[in-house]
Image (cartoon, rainbow, N blue to C red):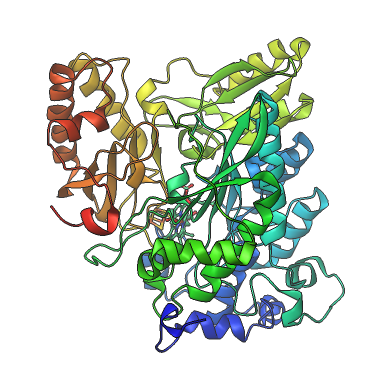
């Protein structure tokens, strides 16, 4: 290998701790027994991520505890591994019970990557949490940290054979790229200690990946998992209803740092077509190329998207072909037309019914809020899980599908869903098209509110759209509490990115298919400015748009923002 493919310099500290961790064990087991603190040592604070947990504390009460000279109320957030987002009713009931009994927020939080999170689990309950999940066949291996994360898949496999096959591939890819160390089983499940050697970790190596790595399998025309947020994507290509292979898209990612032009959101590049039998070899080759060439000096430029722009797309692609022993063919034609979930009932090829329910911000909880809205989403889900014969599928839009409902069970499930607010006909198209990341109070990186801000913001936007004659229309609106972009604002028609308390940068111009990165429109907007911008922009859209022209296409056509064609060139420049 030529040395210029590798960034030289002092390695980031995470490299030390991964290499010295004895294959992700560190001293987590000892640390767990230390009850003097509710937290972990700095190295283990990082290492527990590879086991699917983040140490957090409630930011709403942080200052108050500091005043009382108390340590922050440390707890962990857990993120489960669910390739393709599938959960059985038995699993749901166990997840639900643990959230009631042992999490301080009492909620189940569906994420933008088709899984769920618990927030607020205290140190003495962490092992019980893993053992409870393990008892129903769920783990949280590699859902965070410098590894391949939860593999996403277009979430309605029963809609066609292609969907089912795509899901099978998502599972296989997830297993293939998983860390092989037994650290998780030893630490959390008390299984026998088995030494791990370099030989046991052939794909990820003893220092694992330079940075997080994200993979999807997607079935066009839906792009409901947002391929361009991901390092590696397999776009299903079918002929006569059968999956024949994939177009492989590499190097997407949305995060940036305010004020640092060397960071930017970037679309994935299309490497070309492979037949299905080469899927695992290609996945492995992309991962190992990124493992060897990714920047281990500067974590801000460590993701695959930066490796591609540094070494060149052709060089990276040729290396993948060499390692996989495969030549990419010409890309096969496909089109992404939308990214939303089809809320409501659909009927699958198996003659079963599937109900997609809208869950605002993915937060499954019984609540009553200031607007007089009462919903018992958690109780409703529990009641459904008690009688449901099919399964549940989480979507990457933080929603949930009650899948595989037999004709005779449909009415009962619909009744529970309506009574609990899981079905709510009053939810507007605009609300269904809006999404936010978690942000406060649990996210340590949040600069501004997101999940707690979105519901009220959408109510205001609904009024504005109605005033401008757009009552049934919607704009893909996403709010993210910092530029890391967990709510995927960098693939929104209107993206709000937290800058500071109550302040957001506004980006405009993604499209319905999610194949365009939006562009900065205005900086540091407060609530009133945001609303007046949305008012004047949507009024212009209503008055000047071409027939059926989407908001994101309109703002580019009339020159409100310029189009980002190539991120590294256009995103930060006019
Ligand atoms: Fe994220 C870090 C929440 C999807 C980019 N993300 C975090 C942390 C763990 C904060 C931290 O590091 O301490 C947040 C925890 C908040 C909390 O209290 O729960 C967090 N990210 C989330 C979730 C829960 C948002 C949501 O509302 O659903 C999503 C969980 C996904 C999952 O199940 O795995 C989530 N994060 C994303 C996405 C969207 C996606 O993948 O489709 C992105 C942008 C895509 C990308 O990766 O480019 C994203 N999260 C980040 C980053 C920036 C990564 C980078 O390239 O620099 C961070 C910070 C980091 O890694 O240093 C981050
Ligand atoms: Fe936290 Fe920022 Fe991610 Fe929102 S975008 S969850 S604020 S890291």
Closer to the camera in the image, 98 or 267: 267
User: Looking at the image, can residue 453 be seen?
Assistant: no
Residue drawn at (35%, 43%), measured in percent from left and top?
491
Question: Can you say whether 424 is above or below 129 in the image?
Answer: above
Question: Can you say whether 383 is above or below 262 in the image?
Answer: above
> Which quadrant of the view contains residue 447?
bottom left
Residue that lies at the very extreme toward the bottom in this rendered image:
10
The reply, left or right, for residue 488 in relation to residue 57 is: left
Q: Position of residue 174 (x, y in %)?
A: 67, 54
User: Looking at the image, can residue 148 be seen?
Assistant: yes
Q: Position of residue 23 (x, y in %)?
A: 69, 78
Closer to the camera in the image, 550 or 489: 550
Q: Position of residue 335 (x, y in %)?
A: 45, 31
The number of discs equals: 0
Residue drawn at (47%, 72%), measured in percent from left and top?
294
Residue drawn at (25%, 62%), measured in percent from left and top?
258
> Which quadrant of the view contains residue 218?
top right
Closer to the camera in the image, 433 or 116: 433
Residue drawn at (23%, 54%), measured in percent from left and top?
571
> Which quadrant of the view contains residue 177?
bottom right
The reply, left or right, for residue 292 in relation to residue 529 is: right
Q: Position of residue 326 (x, y in %)?
A: 62, 57
The reply, left or right, for residue 107 in relation to residue 530 is: right
């Amino acid at each position: 290998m030529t040395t210029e493919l590798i960034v030289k310099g002092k390695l980031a500290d995470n490299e030390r701790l991964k290499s010295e961790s004895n294959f992700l064990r560190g001293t987590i087991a000892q640390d767990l027994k230390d009850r003097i603190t509710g937290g972990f040592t700095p190295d283990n604070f990082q290492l527990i991520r590879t086991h699917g947990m983040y140490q957090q504390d409630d930011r709403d009460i942080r200052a108050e505890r500091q005043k009382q000279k108390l340590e922050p109320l440390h707890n962990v957030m857990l993120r489960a591994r669910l390739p393709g987002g599938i959960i059985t009713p038995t699993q749901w009931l166990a997840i639900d019970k643990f959230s009631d009994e042992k999490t301080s927020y009492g909620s189940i939080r569906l994420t933008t990557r088709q899984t769920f999170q618990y927030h607020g689990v205290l140190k003495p309950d962490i092992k019980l949490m893993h053992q409870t999940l393990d008892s129903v066949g769920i783990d949280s291996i590699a859902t965070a940290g410098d590894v391949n994360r939860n593999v996403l898949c277009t979430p309605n496999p029963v809609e066609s054979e292609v969907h089912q096959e795509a899901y099978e591939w998502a599972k296989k890819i997830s297993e293939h790229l998983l860390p092989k160390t037994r650290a998780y089983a030893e630490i959390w499940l008390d299984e026998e200690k088995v030494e791990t050697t370099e030989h046991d970790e052939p794909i990820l190596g003893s220092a694992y990946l330079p940075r997080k790595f994200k993979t999807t399998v997607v079935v066009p025309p839906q792009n409901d998992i947002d391929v361009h947020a991901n390092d590696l994507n397999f776009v299903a290509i079918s002929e006569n209803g059968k999956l024949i292979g994939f177009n492989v898209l590499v190097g997407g990612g949305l995060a940036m740092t305010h004020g640092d032009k060397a960071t930017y959101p970037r679309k994935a590049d299309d490497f070309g077509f492979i037949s299905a039998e080469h899927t695992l070899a290609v996945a492995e080759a992309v991962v190992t190329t990124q493992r060897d060439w990714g920047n281990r000096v500067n974590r801000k430029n460590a993701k695959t998207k930066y490796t591609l722009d540094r070494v060149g797309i052709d060089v990276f692609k040729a290396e993948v072909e060499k390692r996989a022993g495969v030549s990419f063919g010409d890309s096969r034609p496909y089109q992404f037309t939308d990214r939303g979930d089809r809320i409501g009932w659909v009927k699958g090829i198996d003659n079963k019914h599937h109900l997609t329910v809208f869950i605002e911000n993915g937060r499954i909880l019984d609540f009553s809020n200031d607007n007089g809205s009462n919903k018992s989403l958690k109780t409703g889900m529990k009641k459904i899980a008690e009688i449901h014969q099919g399964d549940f599928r989480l979507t990457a839009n933080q929603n949930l599908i009650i899948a595989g409902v037999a004709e005779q069970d449909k009415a009962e499930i619909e009744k529970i869903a309506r009574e609990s607010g899981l079905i709510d006909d009053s939810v507007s198209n605009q609300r269904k098209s809006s999404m936010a990341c978690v942000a406060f109070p649990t996210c340590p990186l949040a600069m501004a509110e997101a999940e707690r801000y979105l519901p009220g913001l959408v109510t205001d936007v609904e009024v504005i759209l109605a005033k401008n004659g757009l009552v049934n229309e919607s704009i893909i609106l996403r709010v993210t509490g910092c530029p890391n972009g967990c709510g995927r604002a960098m693939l929104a028609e209107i993206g709000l990115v937290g800058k500071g308390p109550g302040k957001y940068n506004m980006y405009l111009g993604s499209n319905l298919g999610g194949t365009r990165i939006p562009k900065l429109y205005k900086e540091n907007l407060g609530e009133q400015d945001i609303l007046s911008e949305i008012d004047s922009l949507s009024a212009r859209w209503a008055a000047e748009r071409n027939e059926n022209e989407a908001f994101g296409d309109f703002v580019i056509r009339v020159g409100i923002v310029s189009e980002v064609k190539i991120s590294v060139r256009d995103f930060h420049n006019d």
